[in-house]
Amino acid sequence: MKADLIIPTYRPDDTFCLLLQKLQEQTFVVHRVLILNTEEALWREAVAKYPIEQCLQALPCEYTLYHVSKETFDHGGTRMYGADHSDADVVIFMTQDAVPADADLIERLAAGLEEPDTAVCYARQLPNENCRIVERYTRSFNYPDKSRKKGKDDIKELGIKTFFCSDVCAAYRVDLFRELGGFESPVIFNEDMFFAAKAVFAGYYVKYEADAKVIHSHNYTVKQQFHRNFDLAVSQTMHPEIFEQISSEAEGMKLVKSTMKYLCSIGKPHLIFELGIMCVGKYAGYWLGKRYKKLSRKQILKCTMSPDYWRRLWKQEVSDGNR
């Protein structure tokens, strides 16, 4: 089995260097690393500041660097560009801040795709050392220590989590990836989840591999949560074929209740206030995102974390209208 690793980058830093160093230790050596960098000038700044080129040259495999502009970057389209430049049996997508937790990451992901009906296998995300308690618990809630294979028959039990998948670190069988049309583009968010839903509805499976582990977490501010959840809700509203059938809000409430219970169990009920503030930011963004069609363009640009996506979308609408 030949596998390529595809990593979109934007202002890469020392964490990206650590990722590359951890790749040197993997028991399964990928055929090639494809780096899809946004803005060549920013890449030059990064390599002048961090030992990125040295880390790339130390890889036990080939690597190729591609540059795209910030205006053309798309979560789905840019990753598809990388996949189209791969001739491997498996493509693995990672983000620049996802660090392999051990030497078995790639091997575990590849093993998760051995069954021919499994379209995608995604890794467990462990929190960074500086991760706040609430976010640390969220990681354990979304990424438990038990692996699971998910298909159509699991929708009744798991609901929206049947389609949960994360390109922070996920491996795709190229034959099924191409058969199902890969990632859609343009897409504001959730390209991984939309592909997973396509795979499940087509009769294939999504594998969560708890033994494939990366270290990845964020301490988002309330404002960042607002913007992130606005885009999340927009992406869901644009896909009624998935989200009108299965609500994601019930899963969100389940997480909130579980987190509150956990905070009380560890003697930190005062953090429920912090949780509540975060939830207000998340829900406000989500509520507005669900109603984005009622907002002006100016309001949308204030709410989103992806202004370039909207500018491209509106430009395309004008172009289509002039045909």
Image: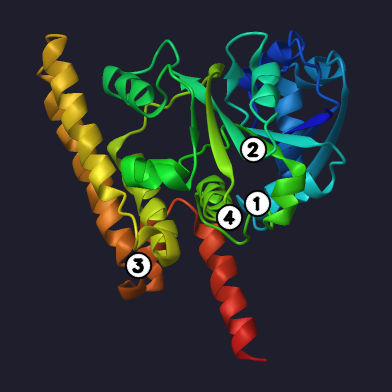
Q: CA distance from mark 2 to mark 1?
A: 9 Å
Q: Residues within 10 Å of mark 2 (few under 14, many from 20)?
A: some
Could you tell which of marks 3 and 2 lies nearer the N-terminus?
Answer: 2
Q: In this view of the protein, which residue sits in the foreground, 39 or 266?
A: 266
Secondary structure under tag 2 reads: loop
Looking at the picture, which amino acid does disc 2 mark?
Answer: Tyr
Residue 70: mark: 1
Looking at the picture, which amino acid does disc 4 mark?
Answer: Ala
Above or below 298: residue 8: above
Residue 94: which quarter of the image?
top right
Mark 2 = which residue? 10
Q: Nearer the viewer, mark 1 or mark 3?
A: 3
Mark 3 = which residue? 292
Q: In this view of the protein, which residue sits in the foreground, 108 or 266?
A: 108
Above or below 319: residue 185: above
Which x, y percent locates residue 123?
A: 55, 25
Residue 202: mark: 4
Q: Nearer the viewer, mark 3 or mark 4?
A: 4
